Amino acid sequence: MQKVYEFLKNAGTYYLATDDKGQPRVRPFGTIHIFDGKLYIQTGKEKDVAKQINANPKAEICAMYKGEWIRVCGELILDERVEAQESMLDAYPNLRDRYTTGPDGNTAVYYFKNATATISAFTHDPETITF
């Protein structure tokens, strides 16, 4: 999982795909974090993407870095613990002016469950990592 985290962190931007009542939706993201031994992403509780994940937790992310690309698929599980939210915002302090934590806050953090990551390139065979 550390290799997946480092790849996504180095890429800077990855693209998250969710399901919106049968219609795929893809958008750029930048938050990636390890907390409590799990790989996390972050968004706003009221955003469409959060509503889509809550309705169907199956999601996939994709990114490119230095001629390689990664695809991570799995289920995104909402973690409502303040500690998880705070850890994410500590890792991305520039988000603190837009996001708040706690039960009344607007931060939603999700971790990957039953995830498979595949790192590919035209120059080598795919590498698969499960976590």
Image (cartoon, grey):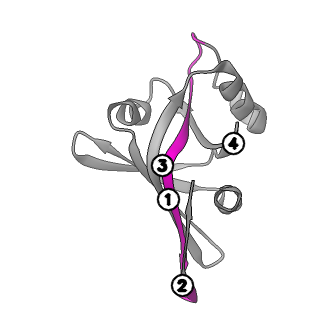
Tell me which label, 1 or 4, sits earlier in the chain.
4
**Could you give the CA–CA distance between mark 1 and mark 4, rounded to whole angstroms?**
16 Å
Magenta residues, start to end: 103-125
Instruction: Name the quarter where the N terminus is drawn.
Output: bottom right
How far across and how far down the image is residue 35, in percent? Answer: 70, 38
Look at the numbered discs 3 and 1 and tell me whether their residues touch, using CB distance below 8 Å. yes
**Could you give the CA–CA distance between mark 2 and mark 1, rounded to whole angstroms?**
16 Å
As drawn, 116 above or below 77: below
To which residue does mark 2 refer? 125
Residue at the spot 52% in from the left edge and 87% down from the top edge: 122
How far across and how far down the image is residue 91, in percent? Answer: 76, 38
Residue extending furthest toward the top: 104
Viewer-closest of 22 and 81: 81
> Is residue 113 magenta-colored?
yes
What amino acid type should be assigned to the residue bearing mark 1? Thr
Residue at the spot 32% in from the left edge and 32% down from the top edge: 55
Tell me which label, 4 or 3, sits earlier in the chain.
4
- The image's mark for residue 37 is 4
> Is residue 59 magenta-colored?
no
What amino acid type should be assigned to the residue bearing mark 4? Gly
Circle 2 SS class? strand
Residue extending furthest toward the left: 22
Number of labels in the image equals 4
To which residue does mark 3 refer? 114
